[in-house]
Image (cartoon, coloured by chain):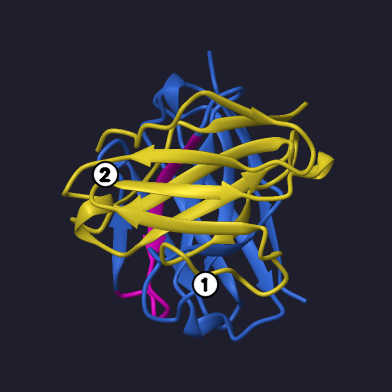
Amino acid sequence: EVVLVESGGGLAQPGGSLRLSCAASGFTFSSYPMAWVRQAPGKGLDWVSGVGGDGTVTHYADSVKGRFIISRDNSKRMVFLQMSSLRAEDSAVYYCAKSHSEVSLYPGLDYWGQGALVTVSS
Amino acid sequence: QSALTQPPSASGSPGQSVTISCSGTSSDIGGYNYVSWYQQHPGKAPKLIIYAVSQRPSGVPDRFSGSKSGNTASLTVSGLQADDEADYYCSSYAGNFQGVFGTGTKVTVL
């Protein structure tokens, strides 16, 4: 059974930093790209970032480029999202998700975690 | 990257069909066969119901079908059931190694 569990959410001040983690199990982790998707309270889904299976290729939405860094540790079956220079508009539930395809993130994300709430406020 | 455009709401009676549109551009939906659809119940994580325009993941009933024509993708839910009442989001590759989601559609089963 595929399971994704996010952690590291919480309250951060504007301009501050936070690191999200996602622990994966139930599949050949290193074979699949992984993504982070966020959802502000009462709003729609917002694609944030993605990383290839070996961790060398990373993708970012324009809204977070230069502020967020995605990485993975295949030996620990973990994906991370280091968030810096946080803004109020970054407040959201952040979901970790697994790619359906071993080749690309974009055909679809077939498993999602339960989400981690990030609140940016002074 | 601007969000893809979906109608805010759609509805149908049990047993009927409902179709949700997802409008984009030639830079996203029209340029790639990378459209996916997600179902989200309140307080829950999204669930993949269609990938690569028209493919269903294992376990998703064939009442759910997807298609694409030009810059617009569509999701049809046939034989509506009470549990189909949820928010639905489309998504597409938008080029430049970025993805984009739709604005979301709330489906109500009357």
Q: Position of residue B14 (x, y in %)?
A: 79, 38
Q: Give me the C-alpha separation between circle 1 and circle 2.
A: 24 Å
* Label disc, if present, on residue A100 of the rendered structure: 1
Position of A63 compared to B12: left or right? Answer: left
Residue drawn at the location 48% of the way across and 57% of the way down: B66
Q: Is residue A46 magenta?
A: yes
Q: Residue at the spot x=80%, y=44% of the render?
A: B81
Residue B87 colored in magenta in the image: no
Q: Which region is colored magenta? A: A45-56
Residue A63 location in percent, x, y?
Answer: 30, 35
Few, some or many residues within 10 Å of mark 1 (<14, 14–19, 20+): many
Q: Which chain is yellow?
A: B
Read off the residue under disc 2: A65
Left or right, A107 with respect to B10, comes to left
Q: Picture quarter containing residue B72? A: top left
In this picture, is A66 found above or below A72? Answer: above
